[in-house]
Image: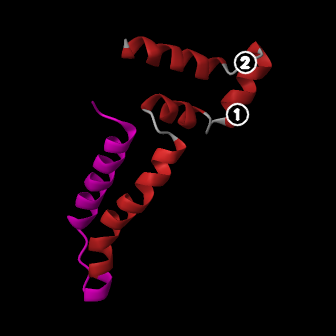
Amino acid sequence: MSTIFTLHEATLADYRDFVQSFLHIADERARAFVDRAPKEWAREAAPELKALSPTPREAVAYILDQFPIVKRRDEGRYGVYQTKETILKRYDEMCR
């Protein structure tokens, strides 16, 4: 099953490959840093990401909380964050 973490890793790898397809770094120290950095970032970031959202459902909830304007609008119209509730309900249905 694909998770937010595997998607994150795949996205970073795709972006790295894209950039490396046309970028030549002449300085060896800079090239070594760039080649090493994504692997180090992934190792360092993964525990932090997992602490924020240890389950995929919590990751979805966290992402939805990053839209304060939608939340404010929903709460004004419906009294609750309707968009988040609807998406999480559909997520739960898909997981059954």
Disc 2, SS: loop
Magenta stretch: includes residue 9: yes
**Would you name the residue on which mark 2 appears?**
80
Tell me if mark 1 has few (under 14), some (14-19) or many (20+) residues whose alpha carbon lies within 10 angstroms of its own.
few
In magenta, the rendered stretch is: 1-30
Q: Is residue 4 left or right of residue 67?
A: left
Q: Is residue 67 above or below residue 86?
A: below
Residue 63: quarter of image? top right
Q: Residue at x 74, y 13 (%)?
A: 78
Q: Residue at x 45, y 16 (%)?
A: 92
**Would you name the residue on which mark 1 appears?**
69
Quadrant including the C terminus: top left
Magenta stretch: includes residue 34: no
Quadrant including the N terminus: top left
Sequence order check: which comes first, mark 2 or mark 1?
1
Closer-to-camera residue (18/41): 41
Residue 32: quarter of image? bottom left
